[in-house]
Amino acid sequence: MTNTKIIVAGPRGKMGREAVKMIHNTEHFTLVGCVDHKNGGLRVKDIEGLPDTDAPIYQDIEQCFKRIEADVLVDLTTPEFGYKHTKLALEHGIRPVVGTTGFTKEQLLELEQLSEEKELGVVIAPNFALGAVLMMQFSKWAAKYFPDVEIIERHHDQKLDAPSGTAVKTAELIQEVREAKKQGHEEEKETLAGARGADVDGMHIHSVRLPGLVAHQEVMFGSSGETLTIKHDSINRESFMTGVKLSVEKVMELNAFIYGLENLLE
Ligand SMILES: NC(=O)C1=CN([C@@H]2O[C@H](COP(=O)(O)OP(=O)(O)OC[C@H]3O[C@@H](n4cnc5c(N)ncnc54)[C@H](OP(=O)(O)O)[C@@H]3O)[C@@H](O)[C@H]2O)C=CC1
Ligand SMILES: O=C(O)C1=N[C@H](C(=O)O)C[C@H](O)C1
């Protein structure tokens, strides 16, 4: 396999750390640099817990792109910066692999257009865990027969976006097969605002945030006399690395915009 030169944005984060380690341990990947808004000028090895590599850290992403030759940007930062970084990567001819969640529909559309204009592959995956991708696909299948559905996502309390990217993507996949339908009683009223969660075409998304959690989602379906629950748990962040690795490999063969890891699986 040809060697892929990778920049990671957000190397100190919970996901960024795992990604840096995975890249360091993958023979056909080379970590050529990192972007960390608080640690410009250091080397990766200077940050506690990161691999012993001399890859430089830049505070400013544009400086990083100007000085370092790279094939792929792996972004694991925040919704605000993830979007800016992805745009800048495309403008510099670098293929983005984005795990950062919380982008708006308009931002996704804009990035898709830029990817087409530049003829460069982009992978934006709301969830890199293979089990989570299957959970979403099974939910889409089930929604064909069970249109009454509630999505309950549970995450650690440091998460910035709600609902999670996975919940949003699950609802979008279900929308492809489910007619809009108001669920619950016709005259249902919330006596406390938000009690029924977010409403997507009548299905509801509930976001739980607690210390101790990692990333979990249940999709519950109900019908006459039965319920069906499809559940996925990420119990650590290594669970996401198979998908990050696959995305980096695939993005090098692509000139298209991919939203969702399911589009890269056979
Ligand atoms: N697609 C997937 O499978 C997964 C996606 N995610 C998503 O990935 C993102 C990161 O998650 P997680 O690692 O848990 O979050 P963390 O808060 O642990 O990590 C984010 C890191 O990005 C850094 N950062 C913030 N702004 C910048 C910037 N401008 N330049 C460089 N670095 C910056 C933060 O630094 P500081 O805190 O010092 O500001 C922090 O170290 C989130 O959007 C999350 O939803 C998470 C898990 C799986
Ligand atoms: O912030 C997280 O932790 C996660 N974010 C992603 C999301 O918003 O769905 C993926 C996973 O759930 C973990």
Image: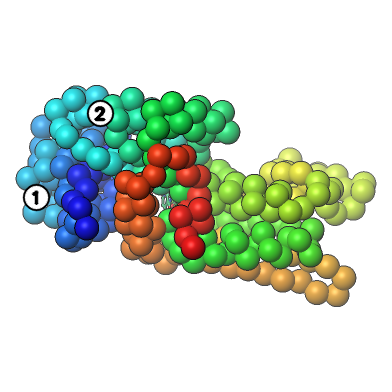
Disc ID at residue 61: 2
The residue tagged 1 is 53
Instruction: Assign a secondary structure to mark 2.
Output: helix
Q: Nearer the viewer, residue 31 or 112?
A: 112
Mark linked to residue 172: none
Left or right: where 171 falls relative to 71 = right
Can the viewer see residue 77 in this picture? no
Between 69 and 184, the one nearer to me in the picture:
69
Q: How is the image coloured?
A: rainbow
Residue at x 22%, y 29% (from the top left corner): 65
Residue shown at 70% from the left, 49% from the top? 176
Task: Identify the mark nearer the N-term, 1 or 2.
Answer: 1
Residue 3 at x, y percent in the picture: 18, 51
Q: CA distance from mark 1 to mark 2?
A: 19 Å
Outermost residue, bottom direction? 225
Image check: 72 left or right of 225? left
